[in-house]
Image: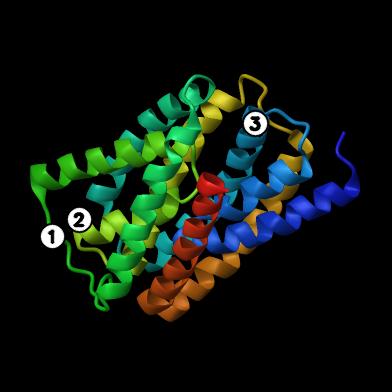
């Protein structure tokens, strides 16, 4: 049984996580550390499962709001989501036997490269100009979905931000369309991971309910601001979140 104060703290963390996640992904940067800090005696798989359950509600709410306002690139989005669903489940199953610490240096390098590329190219993600079609688009979407799906199921933090960067870099989306597509793919990865965690009892019901509610409220505000202010706003938040992710991964890797 979780006491009232820890539940309230988790709710506040989930509120901010939902806001960030709705704009550029990266809510796990706030939500997961909060779970591990506030509930240190719980096993990691239980905290990961609780995080996924809370996140899927906020992500679904944000996706719904984007879909209503943005002309969705469905062909690439759904292909990536299908691959991400399968590989997220595989990633979740791998939690028990793959050492996560091996990933940290590689993820840190990728985050730094993404931040430098986005900052250097001022026009990056400013124009929505899809670059691929047909079989090539389908193949690239499957590849992107498989890679990010496995990472999100296995590890998670920064997956939404990586999705946005890759949708812009390899598909020619702007930040707004990339963020919208990323939300749909994130739903698939969350549902797949939950499909592993939930039946195995790796979740905390009370924490999941409180955090899911707060996550939805945060996502409502985040999606509203992103749709109102467009790609320029999303780009600025993206750079801020990626910078925070770089600092966190650098601390975890070298501290």
Question: Which of the two discs, 2 and 3, labels the residue nearer the N terminus?
Answer: 3
**Disc number lying in front (2 or 1):** 2
Residue 119 percent across, percent down from the top left:
32, 73
Where 81 sits versus 116, above or below?
above
Read off the residue under disc 3: 44
Question: Which of the two discs, 3 and 1, labels the residue nearer the N terminus?
Answer: 3
Read off the residue under disc 2: 170
Q: Is residue 63 left or right of residue 8?
A: left
**Residue at figure coordinates x 74%, y 59% from the top left:** 12
- The secondary element bearing badge 2 is classed as helix
**Residue at figure coordinates x 62%, y 41% from the top left:** 51
Read off the residue under disc 1: 131
Snapshot quadrant of residue 161: bottom left
Question: Which of the two discs, 2 and 1, labels the residue nearer the N terminus?
Answer: 1
Question: How busy is the neighbourhood of tag 3: few (under 14 within 10 Å), some, or many (20 plus)?
Answer: some
- Spatial separation of the CA atoms under disc 2 and disc 1: 8 Å
Residue 255 percent across, percent down from the top left:
58, 48
User: Quick check: marks 2 and 3 in contact, CB under 8 Å?
Assistant: no
Residue 218 percent across, percent down from the top left:
63, 62
């Amino acid at each position: 049984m979780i006491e009232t104060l820890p539940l309230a703290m988790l709710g506040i963390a989930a509120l901010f996580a939902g806001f960030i996640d709705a704009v550029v992904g990266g809510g796990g940067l706030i939500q997961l550390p909060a779970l591990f800090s506030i509930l240190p005696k719980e096993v990691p798989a239980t905290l990961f499962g609780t995080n996924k359950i809370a996140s899927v509600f906020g992500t679904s709410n944000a996706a719904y709001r984007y879909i209503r306002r943005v002309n969705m690139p469905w062909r690439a989005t759904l292909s990536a989501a299908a691959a991400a669903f399968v590989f997220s489940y595989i990633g979740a199953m791998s939690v028990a036997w793959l050492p996560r610490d091996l990933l940290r240096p590689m993820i840190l390098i990728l985050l730094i490269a993404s931040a430098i590329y986005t900052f250097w190219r001022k026009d990056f993600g400013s124009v929505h100009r899809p670059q691929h079609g047909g079989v090539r688009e389908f193949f690239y979407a499957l590849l992107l979905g498989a890679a990010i799906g496995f990472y999100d199921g296995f590890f998670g933090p920064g997956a939404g931000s990586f999705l946005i960067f890759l949708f812009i870099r390899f598909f020619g989306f702007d930040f707004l369309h990339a963020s919208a597509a990323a939300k749909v793919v994130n739903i698939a990865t969350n549902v797949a991971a939950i499909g592993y965690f939930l039946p195995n009892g790796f979740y905390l019901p009370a924490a999941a309910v409180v955090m899911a509610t707060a996550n939805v409220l945060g996502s409502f505000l985040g999606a509203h601001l992103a749709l109102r202010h467009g790609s320029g706003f999303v780009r600025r938040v993206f750079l801020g979140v990626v910078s925070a992710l770089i600092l966190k991964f650098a601390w975890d890797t070298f501290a």
